[in-house]
Image: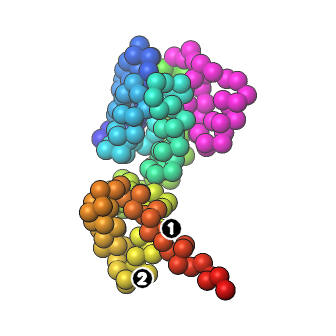
Amino acid sequence: MTGKGKILVVDDDRLVLATLTHGLVQAGFEVIDTDNGDDAILLAREHRPDLALLDIRMEGMSGFDVAAYLRDFLHTPFMFLSAFADEDTVAKVKALGAVDYLVKPLEVRQILPAVEAALAKLPSRKTPPDAAPKPPPEATMPSVAMAVGVLMHRHGLARALALERLQRLAREDGQSDEQMAQRLLDAVELLARPARP
C-alpha cells in the first residue's frame, strides 16, 4: 500500500470515475473503483479503504445506502460527490456523518485537498495499519455483536468461539449470521418477559 492511503471511488458516470481514479493515483493514492453501490460494499469489505468518495444517485444501491453500511459496519469515513445540493440531500449528508460534501462538476485538483484533509483527521493514520486485527464485518453488525455477547454470557465462551457457534447455527439453518442473531435475541427477549398472571 502507498503511504498516502487507500481510497474507494464510486460513481456511475464512467468518465467521472476514470478521471477521479487517474487523478488520485497520480497524486500517490491507492485507488479501488466501481460504478455501482453493490460492488462498492463488496470492495470495501475486501480492501478496507481509508476513505470512500461516493456519488449519491446511482442505479441499485444509492450512495446513501453505501455510506450507511460503511459507517455502521466498517467504520470507514466517506465524502459525497454529487450534482445535487438541495436541502433534503444536504440534510441526509449531515445525518449520515459525511466528512465532506463536494458539488459537481469537480476537477481532481479541487478534490485532493479535501481528501488529504479527511485522511489527516483519521485516528487510524497515527497507528500502524496492522496493529489491531479487525473483526470480520459480520461480527460488527449490532445484532450479531449482541447475540455473540449473549452466547458468551450464557455458555461461558470466548468471543471467537461464541461467534463461531452463532455462524455454525446460521449455516445449519440456512440463514445469514444476522438472521440467526435476530432469532436468538428475539428468543432472549421473549424469555425475559414477565409471565402473565
How far across and how far down the image is residue 66, in percent?
48, 38
Q: Residue at x 40, y 39 (%)?
A: 41
- Which amino acid, mark 2? Arg
Part of the protein shown in magenta: 78-107
As rendered, which of 11 and 162 lies closer to the eye?
162
Q: Which residue is mark 2?
A: 154
Does residue 165 appear anywhere in the picture? yes
How far across and how far down the image is residue 44, in percent?
38, 41
Which of discs 2 and 1 lies nearer the camera? The answer is 1
Position of 176 relative to 13 (above/below): below
Q: Residue at x 30, y 70 (%)?
A: 165
Report which quarter residue 24 is drawn in. Answer: top left
How far across and how far down the image is residue 60, in percent?
45, 29
Report which quarter residue 180 is drawn in. Answer: bottom left
- Which amino acid, mark 1? Asp
SS state under label 1: helix
- Residue 186, labelled with which disc? 1
Q: Quadrant of the N terminus?
A: top left
Q: Is residue 96 left or right of residue 152?
A: right
Q: Residue at x 35, y 80 (%)?
A: 157
Position of 11 relative to 132 (above/below): above
